[in-house]
Amino acid sequence: MNHIQSMVTLSNGKQMPWLGLGVYKMSEGQEVIASIEAAIRNGYRSIDTASLYQNEEGVGQAIKASGISREELFITTKVWNSDQGYDSTLKAFDTSMSKLGLDYLDLYLIHWPVKGKYKETWKALEQLHKDGRVHSIGVSNFQIHHLEDLLADAEVRPVVNQVELHPLLSQLELREYCKSQGIQIEAWSPLAQGKLLDNEVLKAIGAKYGKSTAQVIIRWDLQHGIVTIPKSSNPERIVENAIVFDFELTAEEMKQIDSLNQDQRVGPDPDNFDF
């Protein structure tokens, strides 16, 4: 793990970049296209979108314009809650692929564990995987009990669980469970939507290395073996977020950051959402 294109090997043998660009809340068209172009130009190879974000077409346009071969890129999208169920998931996948303009997807995720639906949705993902249309399948926002329920019947095991994770919500129990099951944890909202940027502990650690609080948090993720996808549409910040391979946090600094945990979410609770 020494540069922006360093990869983690997932439990199915596929490789995924440790660091990627999230495009949540980026508007379709020029904003998302320019952000991805800046990211790819500066070495990023992993892009994370979702049908909910309504910017898959822009993501596809930016990929096409990048001039980077498809095999070098790692593209993730997700099936939204209202599309869950077997047939509707297959249809939603076709829609996403048409918008992205891709022949295959690197990673397809169930966006949220919709009660009574996510198992049928998983069967659809398994079929897409068997058909070779998706190289890896996984979930997002699944708690331990959701994963246990899914694994009880799954033919193909999820290789990724993408969850809200940052120093205020370190998700240690979930991380340990996923590790025991060969499921790679991936952090969305790793910067807690900006709530941690003025944290004094993080600022002090950053000052020691000449790094921003965002860089310190991203480095903390990586040293914990967490795949991370910070979102930014600012080209300078996109570049800055990737300059995290030239320093290393000490064991004591890692503990200091771990101690910031308050089990505090900035997003919805996966056990209590209504969308």
Image: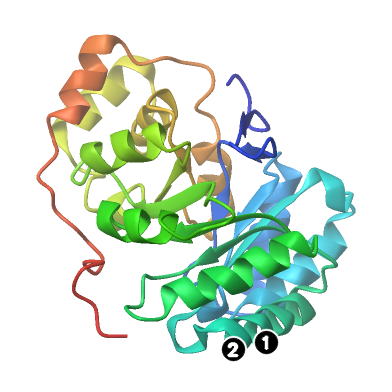
Q: Residue furthest left?
A: 262
Q: Quadrant of residue 132?
A: bottom right
105 in relation to 212, above or below: below
Residue 15: image x %, image y %?
A: 68, 37
Q: Which residue is mark 2?
A: 88
Q: Nearer the viewer, residue 58 or 170?
A: 170
Q: Nearer the viewer, residue 157 or 196?
A: 157
Q: CA distance from mark 2 to mark 1?
A: 5 Å
Q: Which residue is mark 1?
A: 91
66 in relation to 241, above or below: below
Residue 7: image x %, image y %?
A: 64, 31
Judge left or right: residue 241 versus residue 201. right
The residue tagged with tag 1: helix, strand or loop?
Answer: helix
Judge left or right: residue 120 versus residue 101. left
**Label 1: few (<14), some (14–19) or many (≥20) C-alpha neighbours in 10 Å:** some
Look at label 2 and name its amino acid. Ser
Q: Residue at x 20, y 43 (%)?
A: 198
Q: Residue at x 35, y 81 (%)?
A: 116
Q: Quadrant of residue 34?
A: bottom right
In this rendering, the count of numbered labels is 2
Q: Nearer the viewer, residue 87 or 35?
A: 87
- Whether residue 229 is visible to the viewer of this picture, yes or no, is no
Residue 270: image x %, image y %?
A: 26, 67
**Label 2: few (<14), some (14–19) or many (≥20) C-alpha neighbours in 10 Å:** some
